[in-house]
Amino acid sequence: MSEGYQYILEAEHVSKKFGSLEVLKDINLKLKKGEVICIIGPSGAGKSTFLRSLNQLEKITSGKIYIKDELFLHREKDHTVEKLSKEKQQALLLEMGMVFQRFNLFPHKTVLQNIMEAPILVRKEDKNEVEARARKLLESVGLSDKADEYPSRLSGGQQQRVAIARALAMNPEIMLFDEPTSALDPELVGDVLNVMKELADEGMTMICVTHEMGFAREVADRVLFMADGVIAEEGTPEQIFEHPQVERTQSFLKSVL
Amino acid sequence: MKIFENKKVRVTIIVVALILILLTILAIFKPSESALIDSLSPETRQMIEADANSTRKRVTVTYNDMLAINYLSVSSSGASTVSERRVGFCGGIYNADEGAAKIVGQMVNYTYRMLGCGENWMHGAKLTILLTTITVFVGVILGTFLALGKVSKIKILSSFCSGYIFFFRGTPLLIQLFVIYFTIPGVFGFAWKNIFSAGDMEAVYKGAFLAALITFSLNSGAYCAEIVRAAIQSIDKGQAEAAKALGMSYSQTMSRIIIPQSVRRMIPPVCNEFIMILKDASLVFAISLMDITTISKNIMTSEGSYLVFIPALIIYLIITAVFTYIFDKIEKKFSVYE
C-alpha cells in the first residue's frame, strides 16, 4: 500500500475556549505514521481536551485538522468554515480509534457484542468475518475466555483491554488514548500498558495522554509537555525526562517522579 | 421453606389464592336460570315477566321476599338492553335474607358483575384492564418519540413536543376526555358511534371506548415522554461519546446504545404510570362506559347498597398487585447485565 501522504495527522493553530476560559491556545502538532506520542502535564492543562478535539468530541473554536494530508476540520470563531461531505468526514473520523479513561463499554452488550457492534453497524461488514476478527483481537489482549461475559463482570483492567480491542476492531490508523490507566487499580495498570506496548511495537500510530511516566519514557518517540493550554516543551523522552529546559517542566517532573 | 420467607412471594401467593377462591365460588354457585326463577315467589315471578316485556328495564331488581337475596340482576345499559343476566349466589345456599349470609351473597354477586364475568370485553374489570394496558403501550411508544423530539436540536420539533407535553400535563384528564368525546365530534360534525356499523348494538360503547382510548393514550404519552427523557438523560455521557468515536450516527447511537439501556430505568416509573392510569380509567364513567367504577355506582344507586364499593376497592387492589408483580419480573429480566 503506497502512502501518499506526509503526515498522518496534523493539527494547525487549534484553539478552544469555554466562554472566556482559554483551554487550548494555538496548538500545533505534526504526526508521522508509526509515531508514538505521549502527552504529559498537570491536570487542567488541556491534554484531554486536545485529544478529544482531534476526533471532534469537543468542538474547537478555531484551527485546522488534517488526516493523511486531507482536511478533516477547519473552524474559525466557532463556525465550520469548509464543510465536508458526510461520507468523507465519516471516513476520516474512522481513521482514529479512541480509548477512554472510564472505558465506556456498552454495559448491555457482551464483550464480543461490544467489539462487533460498530464494524457491523457502521462499516456494514459481514458478521462472520467480524466475529472471527473480534475473537482474534480478544486473544491478543488476553481475554478470549471472557467473550460472552457482560462488562460488569470484568475488572477495570480487563474492561480497558476490551475497550482497546473494540477500538481496534474498526481498523483505525491512529489510536488515541485518553488517560487509559487513570481509573485503574495500581496492580491492573501493567496489563493495559503491556497491550499498549505491543500495539506500539506493531507500528500503530498512537497519541497517549498519560500519567505513566515510565511508559512514556519507554515507548514514546516524542513526549509533549502541556501546561496552561500550550505545548510548553517537546522532545524525545530523553530530552524531556533527563534534560528538561523549561522551568515549568522541571517543577512538574520533580513533583511526579 | 426458604422461598416463603420472601415477602413478595408471600403476597403473591395470597393474592393468587384469593383469586382462585373467588373463581371457585363463582364456578360452584352458578345455578341455572330456570332453577332460580322456579324458586321465586309468585309475585316476584310476575314482576319479572312484566319486566321482560317492557322496553326499558329496571337496571337491577332486588326482591326482598326471595329466599336468595339479589337473586336476579337484569343489567341494562341506557335505552337499549345490552344483555339480560340472572345471577344467583350464596343467598340461595344459605337460604337467608338477612345477616351475614345476605352480605356474603351480595358481595359475591357484586364482585361477579364488576369483574364483568359472562359479559364481553366492554364490561367491568375487563374494560379497565384492556383500556389501561393499551394506553400504557401506546403511551410509551408515543412518549419515546415525544422525548426524542424534545431533546432534538431541530427547534420547531422540540418546541412542538414541549408544547404538547405542557398542554396534556397542564389540563385535567376529565376535560381532555370531554373535549375528545364531545367537542371534537361537535366541531367536525361526526359521531364516535358512527365509526362502527349501524347495526352494531354496542356501537355507542365502542365509540366511547375509542374516544377514551385516544384521550388516555395522548395524555399518557405526555407523561411517558418525561419518563423516557429522564431515562435517556440518566445514561452516562461516555456512552454516546464512545458510540460517536466508533463512527455511529445519532440514530444508531440512540437505537442501539442509549434507548436499550434506558429501558431498564424506565420500568419502575412506567409501572407507576400504569397504576395511575388504572385508577384514572375510572373517569370513563363520565362517558357512560361500564367499567368497575360505573358498575359499582349503578349498583349503589339502583340497590341502595353502600357496601358495593368495598369489593370495588379490592378488585382495583388485586389488579394493581398483579401488574406490579409483572413489572417486577420484567425489570429483573432487563437487569441481567448489571
Image (cartoon, rainbow, N blue to C red):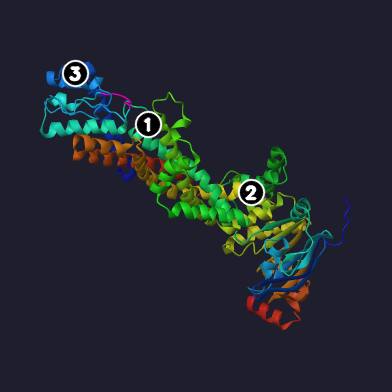
Q: Based on the displayed image, in which of its 4 quarters is residue A65 positioned?
A: bottom right
Q: Is residue A157 magenta?
A: no
- Label 2 resides on the chain identified as B
Q: x, y percentage for residue B42? A: 12, 18
| Secondary element type, mark 2 | helix
Front residue of B120/A2: it is: B120
Task: Give the vertical position of A123 relative to B299 (above or below).
Answer: below
| Secondary element type, mark 1 | loop
Could you tell me which residue is drawn at 45 percent across and 45 percent down?
A: B331
Instruction: Please give the label number shown on residue B37.
Output: 3
Work out whether mark 3 precedes mark 1 in sequence or the reverse, and give the earlier one. 3
Please give the range of residues in magenta. Answer: B80-85
Q: Is residue B237 visible?
A: yes
Instruction: Please give the label number shown on residue B122.
Output: 1
Task: Give the vertical position of A54 relative to B221 (above or below).
Answer: below
Quarter of the image with the C terminus of chain A is: bottom right
Three-letter amino acid code of the residue under disc 3: Ile
